[in-house]
Every structure is written in structure tokens, then in C-alpha cells.
Amino acid sequence: MSEVVHPLDGWYSLHDFRAIDWNAWKSLTAQERARAEDELYTLLGKYQSTEDQKQGSTAFYSIVGQKADFVFMHLRETLEELNELETEFNKTMFAQVTIPTYSYVSVVELGAYMAKPGTDPMQDPDVVARLKPILPKAGHICFYPMNKKREGNDNWYMLPAEDRRNFMRGHGMIGRNYAGKVKQIIGGSIGLDDWEWGVTLFADDALQFKRIVHEMRFDETSARFGEFGDFYVGNLLNQEKMASMLKL
Ligand code: VOV
């Protein structure tokens, strides 16, 4: 058996993608719409205070295209809290005019390939901050799930740890060229959801998503071993932007 390199795990993550049923929204009275918006903004306020207390973090983005209209990306200490958030939202009047289109469950993860031997990474405040991150308020989000291939000679899981370490070093070198332009949150989801990782990228310039994913496709780690699911891309939302989106 190849050596298992266990990643470090941080906050649990839920991506909750929803479409808006515009006919249902339009059929509400102005009073009902006001109540629905009020409930939604109260929840946004709650998410913000959880974040202020560093007990979790939530990103709220619109989604461009027909896969969804918006996404909540929640990070919390436990899977129970994620479940409660989901249920709390589902009980609101606003949720009645939304249609769940996709969701993704994972745990914020840092690979241990580059860890210094003999040190406890969980004692390093920088490591802990990356495992329990406050999500950036960047202009754009890009989410996609991915696997590492398990086919014939291209079986990631059969490679010696040293080879995997070298591949990840190459991957990290490309990533470093995007420092300050793209922030990545890698959610490990083996045993939690349908793919092995959920990749969430944040950037102020959405073109940087295209550039980094394109460049990585030529790197052997992704070229040989990467398998990708659907891509979701969108724009930062807040109460003001949501109010203008919902205005009839
Ligand atoms: C913004 C840039 C960026 C940077 C700096 C970066 C760096 C790094 C480092 C240093 C490490 C961990 C190595 C270790 O110490 O273990 C990783 C780990 C990982 N990455 Fe990454 N990644 C980036 C960006 C980045 C992107 C754009 C993608 C999608 C790939 C693509 O083709 O679309 C990705 C994927 C991953 C994954 C799935 C893992 C886990 C793989 C595993 O097998 O565990 N990642 N990543």
C-alpha cells in the first residue's frame, strides 16, 4: 500500500446553491415580499456576527448562468451547525421561493506533503488561520468539484508519497504566481460528498480564474490526474445588491 499522507482538517464547509422561482416571487404580495426579504437580511446579519466572533464564515454570491441564482458558502466548526443553518434558511419565507439546485459538503483541508517533520502544524497560528479562514469579500467566486484519477498508470493513489509530494510542489509553484490575485480554499470531501475535493477560488478579476485553471491544466498534476465537475462562477452579493436583484 502507498503511504497515506493525512491532510490537516479545519472547518466544515457547505456550498448551498439555490435558484429563485421568479413566478413564485412575483406572486407574493408586496407585504409578503418585504417580510421574506426581512427574514433573509436578518439571517445575513446573523452570519456576519458569527464571522465577527470568528466562530465561522459565510460567503454570499450570485451565480451567473442557469445552474443557480445564488450560493451560500458556510464554514462552521461542526457538521451539525451546517445542518442547522440549512434548516433555518429552509424555514424562512424567502426559502419558499427558492429551488435547491446543488450542494457540496467538505472540510477545509491543507495537504501535509510539505509539512516540516517533527513539528505539530496545529500549533502554528498561520496554519490554523488557513484551516479556519474568514472568507474574502472578493468580487467573484468560482467553485468546482474535482477528483484525482485512478486509472491504469494514472492512479494518483498508487503513486509513492515522494512522487505525490513532487507533483504537489509543482502545483504549489504555479499557485504562488497567483498570490494576491486568486485565493483558494480547498475542501476535502472523500467520504463526505460525490467528488474528492471542492475547489473554491476568490478573485477581484474573474479572468484570473480562467488563467489559473488554464495554466494548471498544463501542469502534470492536473493534466494527468485531474478530473473536474461542473463549474459555478458568480459575483459578490450583500444586502444592498440582493435588494436590487429582488426588486420588481
Ligand atoms: C491560488 C493558488 C493556489 C495555490 C498557491 C495552491 C497551492 C497548493 C498547495 C501548496 C497544496 C498542498 C500541497 C501539500 O502540502 O500537500 C495544494 C493542494 C491542493 N490544491 Fe492547490 N493551490 C492553488 C490553486 C488550486 C487550484 C486552482 C486547484 C484546482 C486544480 C485545477 O487544475 O483546476 C487546486 C487544487 C488543489 C487540490 C485538489 C489540492 C489537494 C491535493 C491533494 O492531493 O492533497 N489548487 N494547493
Image (tube, rainbow, N blue to C red):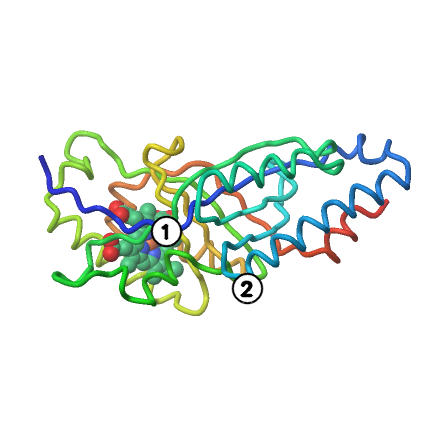
Q: Position of residue 85 (x, y in %)?
A: 58, 41
Is 25 displayed left or right of 189 in the figure? right
Q: Which secondary structure, mark 1?
A: strand
* Residue 225 spot, x, y in % from top left: 26, 41
Residue 144 appears in which quarter of the rendering?
top left
Up-down relation of residue 57 to residue 154 (above or below): below
At x 37% / y 56%, what residue is drawn? 131
Question: The N terminus lies in which quarter of the figure?
Answer: top left
> On residue 64, which mark appears?
none
Query: Residue extending furthest bottom?
Result: 180
The residue shown at (35%, 67%) is 177
**Which one is nearer the viewer's eye here, 59 or 236?**
59
Question: On the image, numbered disc 1 is attached to which residue?
Answer: 10
Mark 1, residues whose alpha carbon is within 10 Å: few (<14), some, or many (≥20)?
A: many
Nearest to N terminus: mark 2 or mark 1: 1
Q: Amino acid at mark 2?
A: Asp
Task: Give the CA separation, mark 2 to mark 1.
Answer: 25 Å
Residue 178 point in image, percent of width and height: 39, 65
**At 39% across and 30% down in the image, what residue appears?**
194
The residue at the far right in this view is: 30
Residue 74, x across and y down, in percent: 52, 47
Q: Residue at x 85, y 45 (%)?
A: 34
The residue type indicated by label 1 comes to: Gly
Q: Quadrant of the C terminus?
A: top right
Rendered view: 197 above or below 136: above
**Which mark, residue 204?**
2
Report the number of numbered marks: 2
Instruction: For residue 2, say whether it is visible.
Output: yes
Q: Nearer the viewer, mark 2 or mark 1?
A: 1
